[in-house]
Amino acid sequence: MEIDQQQNQLALQNARQLIADNEKQRAQARLSRLVDDFLSGNGKVLLQDEFIQNISRMIAEVSQEGSAELAVKLVENLENYACGEDGLLRERAVMALSFCSGLLSFEKQHDLLMLVTFAQAHWLKMETTYHPACDTVCRQLLRNGLKMMAQGHWQQLEPLVEIIFQIQSGILDKGNVIHGLVARVQDALAADHILEELVMVCLHEQGERQSLVERILARLGRRAVLFLLEKLSISEQKDERLYLIKLIRQADKVSVPVLREFLSKEMPWYGYRNIVLLITAMGDSTLVPMVLHLLKHSDIRVQQQVIECIDNIGGAYKKNYLLSALSLVHDTLKVSLVVRLGKLGCDIECAEVLLDILVDRDSIPLDIRNELIGQICVVLRLAPLKRALILLRELLVEQSKLEEGGMDPVSSIIRKTLQIIEPQLKPVARNGSEKPNKISLAQNKEEKQRSESNQFSLDGKIQQLINEKRIAEVTALIVENAVQAAKKKDFVTAEILRDRMLAVNPEALSEAIHENGVITEEKKNAISSHHLSLWKDLYEFLDSGTFSALYHCQRLKEYQAEENLVQQGDAHQTLFFLDEGLVRLTCKRGQTETFLNQMGPGEIVGVGPFFDVSVWTVTLTAMTAVKVRVLEREPFQRLLVQYPGLESNLMDYCRKSEQIAEVLKNSGADRRENVRYPVEFIIFNSMQDEMENSTAQRFKGELEDISLGGLSLLIRISKRENARLFLGRRIVSFLPTGSDRDPDCRGIIVGVTINDYVDQDYLVHVRFDRALSADDLIKIILHWHK
């Protein structure tokens, strides 16, 4: 009985085996037919799971059995469909390639695996839609890329690295998910031990191998640039330093954001010098602002390198950069700076800055005093000014007392400069019948009217004396009245009369020097000891001359209790210096008014609207009788011509003491009423005129975030002052929802803030007239995610 059972089981097993063998043969036959169809151009075969599941095994097996030609042909056909136009066939073909990559051996089937790898890379290059296969492909590309790197197959690695670089740098447009996957592959390929090996090859080998590795390094992205910058920052060998600079330059635009980040790190002086050398070698004038802060570096060698950078690639702003450097760098560098400015051609702005140095000549170190003064005098020959004439005469008298009776080299230079500029000024100055230009420094209408009234009674007497050619008497009359005006603190009239006197009598230099001294002294005396005590910190932060100029650029205003100085939403570019009384800061959110803070004497309000481009985010109201000194943007801009470093210094001081941003943050009132959602895509916009008609020309901007009540838009603005023109303007933004009806959102620009100093990118903040519907907002966000 047992024998019968065993025989039955054996017979059953044989039958099953026979069936399995027959099924295997049939499956093999079906696969062979499918392969034949596939090779004949029937792509629909890819839609059959049986083909997808078995083709990779077949490719692996036939390559081992010596049929490499068939394996290659199958892989090439899969690549063609993976890069074809049919989205479904692309997805199925890349799935088969992924199965194949997992079965092939890097060592035994290297050539075929490389063929599969580059087929996957080509698919990734042209695919724009994310599929689950993207994750698998990126993992396999990384695995095979690391193996190529480890075994020195750099020539095969280069095209793979190039595709990854093009995706990561935006040359190939991909969605955020694919971009993120590829970024991880690039970062992993740029591991420190790999970069170390590549750099060693670059430094110590030559020829094609070196060139190949250079190209790979240039395509390994942010981490490679950061690694090279670390190397550069500690390099003290000139040849190595120059070679590293060459390598980083090849990374092109990838290096710019990394450089900006790297410059914020602490490093030895030669590290900063090397980075400045790199930026100079890159030859892009828009990168110069990145290193301007190093003009204040404690090491003179770093300052010198920044000056060289400005001189080499400063572009259209070279002169402005060099003028700013004069007040920042070590004294020993100022002579060369003046020489460079002279080569650029000294205009009025440049001459005024150089004359300010001559005014403050007592602070010049003795070891460079004569050389610096002499060089300034040479450069001033290019821009003849009345003020220069006065100062040079004064300086010549001073030099004659100090040096060899006026026979020293500096005196000779001064005399030569006077000989050059005097003839250029005299023809204009001696034309007594022509009314001289009135130079008005009035800060408001009241001062200007008072000045004109004071001059009116003099005009008749002056003109009569001029007609009678009684020049000495008219000079004495003008000087007398100018001094009287200065002592009455009417500095506008005093300065106009001073300039008029020189126009009438250009030989009256000693009188002009005396008059100028009286005005300067009276200006200083006009500032009360109480005011100096109240603003002691600001006085110490600025030099006395700059503080005095700033003081006289302001105007005094008084407010009664409960009177608004400024209201939330106003676009006034005004800085308030509180002298007496108390003010409160409040802000409205909806119908609710929130008390933020109380401020008093010695505090400054309005930093954001004055220095940035934004509306007032708070209301400022007098709690008691208040006296403030008001600084407005327009007269301040005129003052900057004489004091080019004033804006940055005043901004630094105000940022340290300004409280509005902090109290808004602490109160939560700086947030929008609606949640903002980050989005990133290009939209079209159009400005509107006063009648709310849209202009014909549309412009593009990159949407940064959006809420029910407004949006932020990234655009490029060539000049900072132009950014101010956007404030308060009306705008229409056309927002895609993916539906038949896209909303055109109308609103007002309530703020413009700098986003990128190098590229001059600004964030434009828009508040909608009418809130978006929740449905439209969701559609916009979903459209972006697609």
Image (cartoon, grey):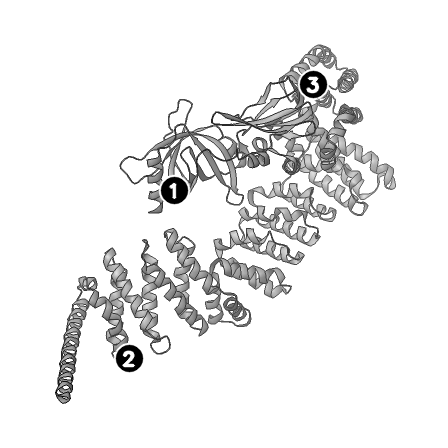
Residue 45, relative to residue 559: is it above or below? below
Residue 454, relative to residue 22: is it above or below? above
Q: What residue type is labelled 3?
A: Gly
**Mark 2 vs mark 1, CA separation in Å:** 52 Å
Nearest to the eye among marks 1 and 3: give it: 1
Residue 471: x, y in percent? 76, 17
Quadrant location of residue 350? top right
* Mark 2 element type: helix
Nearest to the eye among marks 3 and 2: give it: 2
Q: How crowded is mark 2: few (under 14 residues within 10 Å), some or many (20 or more)?
A: some
**Mark 3 vs mark 2, CA separation in Å:** 106 Å
Q: Quadrant of the N terminus?
A: bottom left
**Marks 2 and 1, the one that precedes in the sequence:** 2
Q: What residue type is labelled 1?
A: Ile
The residue drawn where x is 41% and y is 25% is 689
- Left or right of 558: which side holds 21? left
* Mark 3 element type: loop
**Marks 1 and 3, the one that precedes in the sequence:** 3
Question: Which residue lies under the disc numbered 3?
Answer: 432
**Mark 1 vs mark 3, CA separation in Å:** 63 Å
Nearest to the eye among marks 2 and 1: give it: 2
- Left or right of 449: which side holds 169? left
The residue drawn where x is 37% and y is 28% is 694
Question: Which residue lies under the disc numbered 1?
Answer: 682
Question: Which residue lies under the disc numbered 2?
Answer: 64
Residue 163, relative to residue 335: is it above or below? below
